Image (cartoon, helix red, strand yellow):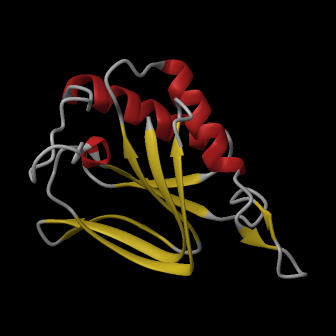
Amino acid sequence: MRAVIQRVRSGKVTVNGALKGEIGRGLVVLVGVGCGDGPEDVRYLAEKTANLRIFEDDNGKMNLSCLDVGGEVLAVSQFTLYGDCRHGRRPSFSEAAPPDVANVLYGEYVQKLREQGLRVATGEFGAMMLVEIQNDGPVTILLDSKKIF
């Protein structure tokens, strides 16, 4: 599984003009599920997301997690994180998990974040979404459960 994690002042997602999810201070997480991902990938990514120390403490150091600051999470499914652009000009998505598998693991990821005490809003799996992000910093972190980066 892969995630692009952005520290935000706010974030929201709409589908066909209808608001699906909205948060204040916290994290917007774009989540991709790859072929072969399973429960261990979900656990790793959710634990990292909740405990990643990218919020500033009283001394201005990134030393606090989303849990520490009472932040929220907007988790948005994003299969394009598995786009392979090494050959040609059109990305290949052959490494992205099939939608039925990806939807289950994405749901488990959201549930694991909630179990850790985070308020989590979501978009709509498989839909064309408009995601609005007020990136704070900007702070953007890449995670991969296979630890390839």
Image quarter of residue 74: bottom left
Q: Residue at x 37, y 70 (%)?
A: 12
Q: Is residue 38 above or below residue 62?
A: above
Estimate the x, y position of residue 59 in percent, counting from the top left: 90, 81
Q: Residue at x 56, y 20 (%)?
A: 40
Q: Is residue 148 above or below residue 129?
A: above
Closer to the camera in the image, 129 or 86: 86
Q: Residue furthest right?
A: 59
Closer to the camera in the image, 8 or 36: 36
Estimate the x, y position of residue 38 in percent, counting from the top left: 45, 19
Q: Judge left or right: residue 121 versus residue 27.
A: left
Closer to the camera in the image, 85 or 116: 85
Estimate the x, y position of residue 23 in percent, counting from the top left: 48, 69
Q: Is residue 126 above or below residue 40?
A: below
Q: Residue at x 48, y 41 (%)?
A: 110
The N terminus, quarter of image: top left
Closer to the camera in the image, 1 or 148: 148
Q: Is residue 114 above or below residue 10?
A: above
Number of numbered labels in the structure image: 0
Q: Judge left or right: residue 84 versus residue 28.
A: left
Q: Residue furthest front?
A: 87
Estimate the x, y position of residue 10 in percent, counting from the top left: 49, 77
Q: Residue at x 58, y 39 (%)?
A: 46
